[in-house]
Image: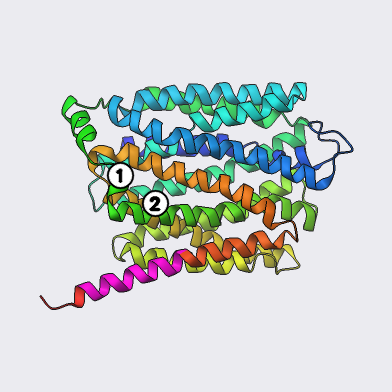
Amino acid sequence: MQRIEWILFLTVLLAVAGFALPTPVITPMFMAQDGGLLAVDTGQTERVWWLMGCFALYPLGQMLGSPWLGRLSDRFGRKPVLSAALVGVVFSYLLMAVAIWWQWLGLLLTARLLSGLCNGTVAIAQALAADISAPERKPILFSRLNIALNMGWIIGPLAGGLLAEQSGEYAMPFLVAGIVALLNLCSVYWGLPDRPQSRSTVTAAVKTAGLWQFPQVRLYLLLTLLSYGAIMLYFNFFNVWLVERFGQTPFELALAAVVVSVPMSVGSWLAGRLSGRVDLLWLGLAGHLLMALGMGLFVVPPSLLGLYLVMTIAGVGITIGEQATALGVSNNAPAEQQGEAMGLYRGLAMGSELSAAVVGAVLILPGLEFAYIGAALLALSCAVIFLQQAVMQLGWRLMPG
C-alpha cells in the first residue's frame, strides 16, 4: 500500500478500536444489578430499554452528524474537518469516563450522543479513498478499509474487556478509548496531506443536483438502510443474547466479538478480490443470502461452538454486503460529492441502528429470538432487491441493439 493508504487504514483502525473499546462493559453496566447506573430494584425489561436507549444515542448522533461532516469535508477539505471531529470524540470519551465515576446517567447519555455527532471518521476516510484511487483500485482500497474496521472490532473489545476485568473499573475502557482517539487525531494531523478543495470543486458541488435525484444512488441508499437494519438488529442484541443464554463476562463478550470479527475481515478481503470481477449486484445478492442464513440460525445452536459457526457465516455475508452497498453509493455519486455521499451512507447506516434499537425493543417482548428472525427477513429482502436488479440488468444487456 502507498503511504496515504496506510494512514487511512490506521485512521479507520484506531477510530473503530476506540469506539469498540467500551462495548463489552456497556451491557453489564445496564444489565447487572451492581452496575451502578440504575437502581438495584430496576426490572430486567426496564434495564433492556435503558440499554437500547444508550445504544440508540450514538447512531442518532452519527445519523445527524455524518452527512454534515461529509459535506463540510467536500467544501473545506478532508483533513481539517476530520481533525476537528476527532477533538470532539476525545472530549466525549473523557466525559463518559467521568459520568461512570460519578454514576451520572444523564451525562453518560449526553456524551454518547456527542460522540456520535463527532464521529464521522470512517465516512471521510472512504471519501478520501475515493478521491485518491483509480476506479479499478477503489474496490481493493475500500475492502482494506473494511478490514481495518473489522480489525478495530477485534482489538477494541478484546482490550476493553481485559481492561475492565483487570482494573475492576467500568470507566477504564472509556478513558483508554479517549487516549486512542487522541492518537488517531495525531495520526491524521501529522500523517494525512492537506488537500484543500478548490474553488471550482466547491462551485461544482453546489451546482450538482442533490444525491437523492440520482436513481442508482437512491437504490443503493435504500439497500444500505435495509441492510444495516439487519446488521444492527443482529449486533444490538448480540451481547444480550450471550449474557442471558450463556452467562458471558465482559472479557468473554470481547472474545465473542473477536470470533465474529475474524470472518468479517476475511469477508472484506474476499469482497475486495471479487468486486472487480463480479458485478456489484451479484456480489450484494451473495452477501445478503449469507447474512440471512447466519442471522436466521443464530438462535438455534445450544452450544458456543455451534454459535460461532453460525456467526462465521453471518460475518462473511455482512462484509460482502457492506462492500456492495458502499461501492454502489460511491460509484454512482459525482466525484465532487464523495464526502456528502459517504457521509449520507454512514448516516443511513447508523440511522438503521437507531431504528433497529426501537424496533428490536418491541420485537423482543415475546422473546429475544424474534430480533434475529427480523434481521434475517431484512437481509432476505435486500437479497430479493439485488436479484431483481441483477435480472433486469441482465435482460437489458441481452436486448438486441
* Residue 139: x %, y % from top left: 32, 53
* Residue 121: x %, y % from top left: 44, 34
Between 83 and 385, the one lying in front of the other is: 385
Q: Residues within 10 Å of mark 2 (few under 14, many from 20)?
A: many
- Residue on which disc 2 sits: 221
Residue drawn 49% across the image and 32% down it: 119
Residue drawn 30% across the image and 55% down it: 216
- Residue on which disc 1 sits: 211
Is residue 384 found inside the magenta-colored segment of the image? yes
Q: Residues within 10 Å of mark 1 (few under 14, many from 20)?
A: some
**Image quadrant in which you'd find residue 122:** top left
The reply to whether discs 2 and 1 touch (Cβ–Cβ < 8 Å) is yes
Which quadrant: the N terminus?
top left
Q: Looking at the magenta stretch, what is its main secondary structure?
A: helix
Q: Which residues are magenta?
A: 382-396
* Residue 307: x %, y % from top left: 68, 64
Q: Helix, strand, or loop for circle 2? A: helix
User: Mark on residue 167?
Assistant: none
Task: Evaluate whether residue 168 shows in this view.
Answer: yes
